[in-house]
Amino acid sequence: MIKKFTFNSQFILDELPTIDREFLENIMVDKKYRKNQPIFTEGTLPSGIFYLQSGKVKKYKMDNDGREQIIYIYNAGEFFGYSSVLSESTYGDTVVAIENSTISFITITDFNEILKDSSSFSRLLLKSLSHEFSVLANLMAVLSQRTVRERVALNLLILHDKYKVDEVENTYIMLSRSDLANMTGTVIETLARVLHDFKHDKLISTDGRKIQLLNIEGLIKVANFY
């Protein structure tokens, strides 16, 4: 279920031939970003692409009321910013770190060079880009057709998948209530009521900003998505 709502660029490096992967890793320049620090903003011209080594960043647009609408949260291992480079256009959204993150940068020159020299990288990138369009269409359908309660449940399941760590029994979602509300497409007050109901029904537990899912099957039913 969750795969319909997550990009798949995190598999690009793993599937590249060794020589292409080593070239890509050698041209990456790492930079540390603090929580809430922007990586790029909507309307600016791209100078390269990005690869998230560690941490998490959010991709969002501003609506007519000046409120963020979070489109996607990137996890470690994902590329981003390449669609604007490929289309030779300005960035169509803003990307900001939501926790301290390490991000690698690849210049347009180096990016174009590996695109030209590596058919594998070009194929994997095109495959990833096509999947992104499908994911965004699915997310738009959820926002327009699902109730707030269903949207909150679904986004908690998506976030649980992003925050889980192998061999760690308990997964905690560490996202601000404002970001979760913007991701769900609602206001904080409505989100708080839904989370309170979920706690009452023993679907989740909370500790400050931390959320733990207690009943995944129950949330899948609430999300009305199988």
Image (cartoon, grey):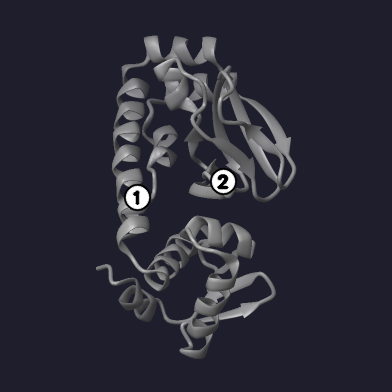
Between residues 30 and 174, which one lies in front from this camera angle?
174
Q: Residue furthest left?
A: 226
**In the depicted structure, whether residue 108 falls above or below residue 141:** above
Q: Measured from the top left, where is residue 19 in percent x and y?
A: 44, 20
Q: Which mark is residue 140?
A: 1
Image-based side of 127 in relation to 190, left or right: left
Quadrant assignment, res 210? bottom right
Q: Residue at x 62, y 65 (%)?
A: 177
Q: Which mark is residue 53?
A: none
Q: Measured from the top left, where is residue 32 in percent x and y?
A: 72, 36
Image-based side of 41 in relation to 32, left or right: left
Q: Measured from the top left, where is residue 201 in percent x and y?
A: 46, 89
Q: Earlier along the polypeptide chain: callout 1 or callout 2?
A: 2
Characterize the local packing of mark 2: few (<14), some (14-19) or many (20 or more) Cα atoms within 10 angstroms: many
Q: Residue at x 30, y 61 (%)?
A: 145
Residue 170 in view of the camera: no
Q: Residue furthest front?
A: 65
**Foreground: disc 1 or disc 2:** 1
* Residue type of the residue flagged with mark 2: Lys
Between residues 36 and 104, which one lies in front from this camera angle?
36
Viewport quadrant of the N terminus: bottom left
Q: Which mark is residue 58?
A: 2
Q: Residue at x 33, y 65 (%)?
A: 146
Q: Residue at x 55, y 75 (%)?
A: 212
Viewport quadrant of the C terminus: bottom left
Tag count: 2
Q: Secondary structure at mark 2?
A: strand
**In the depicted structure, whether residue 108 falls above or below residue 191:** above
* Residue type of the residue flagged with mark 1: Met
Q: Measured from the top left, where is residue 157 in percent x and y?
A: 43, 66
Q: Secondary structure at mark 1?
A: helix
